[in-house]
Amino acid sequence: MTIAATKIIDNRIITSKPFEVRLRAPQSLDSGSVKIHHIRHQDLVDGIDEKQALIQLLEFIGNRPLVGYHIRYDKKILDLACRKQLGFPLPNPLIEVSQIYHDKLEKHLPNAYFDLSLDAICKHLDLPMQNKHDALQDAISAALVFVRLTKGDLPSFNLPYNR
């Protein structure tokens, strides 16, 4: 299991100083988890313990909002771990990039169908596509979407799935 984040300052994504830690393999890591996350037990041999990882994460994020794609799921997992290890959930507010994207498109194309997958959002916003879906790449992609939607213009609405 990996926890990763990157900071967004104004309209810049600070990829030169990301947060990324690997946790020690949990007992629950089975073949199904390996297929989904592409992480094996041997990949986590040098991982740190959960409590240490959470403390480092809290130091990195401070009181900033958490920006992400399906961020509520990630926060639920982090809250469970924080309650178990530290006695409290993460207090940070959440910003869901797929919701921002949906809301902006809905203003221009009411009641249309929108593909809200991260790949489709990145493609429509002309953002680089990541082949490797790991925690850090997903954090960077969500940050790119956030900056594009909050600091830039939307591209044209000639979406292939709305024709």
Image (spheres, rainbow, N blue to C red):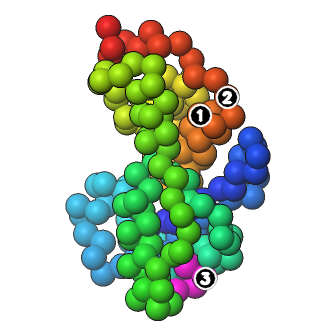
Q: Residues within 10 Å of mark 2 (few under 14, many from 20)?
A: few
Magenta residues, start to end? 51-55
Cα gap from disc 2 to disc 3, whole angstroms = 34 Å
Residue 129 position (above or below residue 96): above
Mark 1 burial class by Cα count in 10 Å: few <14, some 14-19, many 20+ = some
Residue 73 location, quadrant: bottom left
Residue 42 visible, this orientation: no
- Find numbered disc 3 in the image and state the secondary structure of the residue it sits on: helix
Above or below residue 116? Residue 107 is above
Which residue has dot 1 on it? 149
Q: Position of residue 13 (x, y in %)?
A: 71, 46
- Amino acid type of the residue tagged 1 in the rendering: Leu
In the image, what residue occupies the spot 41% across and 88% down? 84
What residue did someone put label 3 on?
55
The N terminus, quarter of image: bottom left
Magenta span dominant secondary structure: helix
Q: Nearer the viewer, mark 1 or mark 3?
A: 1
Q: Is residue 36 visible?
A: yes
* Labels 1 and 2 touching (C-beta < 8 A): yes
Residue 42 drawn at (x, y percent): 43, 70
The structure residue drawn at horizontal position 44% and vertical position 41%, both measured from the top left corner, is 98
Separation of marks 1 and 2 at Cα, in angstroms = 6 Å
Q: Nearer the viewer, residue 161 or 45?
A: 161
Q: Residues within 10 Å of mark 3 (few under 14, many from 20)?
A: few
**Which residue is label 2 attached to?**
152
Q: Secondary structure at mark 2?
A: loop
